[in-house]
């Protein structure tokens, strides 16, 4: 058998929209709240099959002959649609929080640099670019990233001052410009390098938390589902003591903390909620985001709360974040002040 024939046999045929509803019905997904024709229309004009059905594993499945099968006990298509909308709204709020975290991390670094006597705003950048240029595993990774930005009209205003031709080492970019031309992931790497160079132990602790925020940023920026597979236990690393204290302060017990943080996405969202309050220094920005969180959590998410009456997983996750939000994101909108 030639390679082309093997490929033809192994590839699954594309499923037509008219075939999707019958296929979901085979998995015991019901269409009582949202009729079949309406569901077909939704899949054709509002969302795709992959995105909508990504949430199905947040619901209980039948357990037959010692293993779970792909048939669901209490799942209507309307529940999946509702979760898709909640996910979209959640991504908008989270992305807003993350770009604020990135902005205020830059401000934090600039403020810290002022207190380092031997630092002139060039030294640490040159040291970092030197390390990047000669890195054994990923040489010139940041160099390449910077050069790729030359084509952007926005960044050309910065780059015209520097010789970026060829494969030479980039030097003497001041930190206030350097921070604006690196990605969020690169920013966190630089923050770690800076904190270790000047032995800023408290700052180093933030790096591990920020790396989780970067992962979430990549997901929301690419419109990936963030509220699917919430039942997975795929992160067994011990949380930082700052997170432990943060959750203790929310009266979240050790057992609950361990259970929820063992899911990577729940951990990433938790770390983002922590880091936003830790690093953002503008009261106005905090008030604005807090209102968004409250509107999402106490209005949109519970709009169809009856859908989840029998879903212990999602109810327990809601209760977990409810404690965090009530403790750290409570807002008195009329007085326009945080409480």
Image: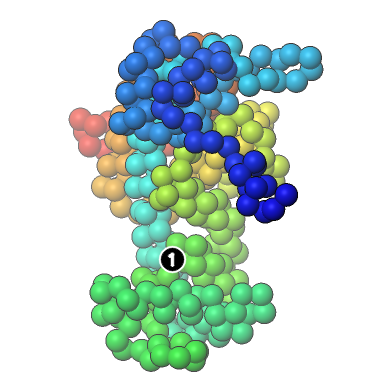
Q: Nearer the viewer, residue 268 or 28?
A: 28
Determine the residue positioned at 66% across, 75% down: 137
Q: Of all residues shown, which one is farthest toward the left?
A: 334
Protein image colouring: rainbow
Which residue is more in the foreground, 231 or 166? Answer: 166
Q: Is residue 183 above or below residue 171?
A: above
Q: Can I make out residue 222 in this image? A: yes
**Residue at figure coordinates x 58%, y 44% from the top left:** 243
**191 sits to left or right of 280:** right
Report whether residue 339 is seen: no
Residue 27 image offset from top left, x and y in percent:
57, 17
Pinpoint residue 126: horizontal percent, then vertical percent: 49, 85
Which of the 4 image quarters holds residue 182? bottom left
Q: Tell me what residue is drawn at x 33 percent, y 17 percent.
A: 38
Place residue 293 in its image quadrant: top left
The residue that label 1 is drawn on is 183
Left or right of 293? Residue 25 is: right
Q: Position of residue 95 (x, y in %)?
A: 38, 47
Residue at 40%, 54% (x, y): give it: 101
> Which secondary structure lies at badge 1?
loop
Q: Nearer the viewer, residue 49 or 11?
A: 11
Q: Residues within 10 Å of mark 1 (few under 14, many from 20)?
A: some
Position of residue 157 in the picture relative to residue 63 (left or right): left
Q: How many marks?
A: 1
Q: Residue furthest top?
A: 32
Residue lying farthest to the front in this orientation: 1
- Picture coordinates of residue 199 (x, y %)? 60, 71
Q: Quadrant of the C terminus?
A: top left
Q: Quadrant of residue 153?
A: bottom left
């Amino acid at each position: 058998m030639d390679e082309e024939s093997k490929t033809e046999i192994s590839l699954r045929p594309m499923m037509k929209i008219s075939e999707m509803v019958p296929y979901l019905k085979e998995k015991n997904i019901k269409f009582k709240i949202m009729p079949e024709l309406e569901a077909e229309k939704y899949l054709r004009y509002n969302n795709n099959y992959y995105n909508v059905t990504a949430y199905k594993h947040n619901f209980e499945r039948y357990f037959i002959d010692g293993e779970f099968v792909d048939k669901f006990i209490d799942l209507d298509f309307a529940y999946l649609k509702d979760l898709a909308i909640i996910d979209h709204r959640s991504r908008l709020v989270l992305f807003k929080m993350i770009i604020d975290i990135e902005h205020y991390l830059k401000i934090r670094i600039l403020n810290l640099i002022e207190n380092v006597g031997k630092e002139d705003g060039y030294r640490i950048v040159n040291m970092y670019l030197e390390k990047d240029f000669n890195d054994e595993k990923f040489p010139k990774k940041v160099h390449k990233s910077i050069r790729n930005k030359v084509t952007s009209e926005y960044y050309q205003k910065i780059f015209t001052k520097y010789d970026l031709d060829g494969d030479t080492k980039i030097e003497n970019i001041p930190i206030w410009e350097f921070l604006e031309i690196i990605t969020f992931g690169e920013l966190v790497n630089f923050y770690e390098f800076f904190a270790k160079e000047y032995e800023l132990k408290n700052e180093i602790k933030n790096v591990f938390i920020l790396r989780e925020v970067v992962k979430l940023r990549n997901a929301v920026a690419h419109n990936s589902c963030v509220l699917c597979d919430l039942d997975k236990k795929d992160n067994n690393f011990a949380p930082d003591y700052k997170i432990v204290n943060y959750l203790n302060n929310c009266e979240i017990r050790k057992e609950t903390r361990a259970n929820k943080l063992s899911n990577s996405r729940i951990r990433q969202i938790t770390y983002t909620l922590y880091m936003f309050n830790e690093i953002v220094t503008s009261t106005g920005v905090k008030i604005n985001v807090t209102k968004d969180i409250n509107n999402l959590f106490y209005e949109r998410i519970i709009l169809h709360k009856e859908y989840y009456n029998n879903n212990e997983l999602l109810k327990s996750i809601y209760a977990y974040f409810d404690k965090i939000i009530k403790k750290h994101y409570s807002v008195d909108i009329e007085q326009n002040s945080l409480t």
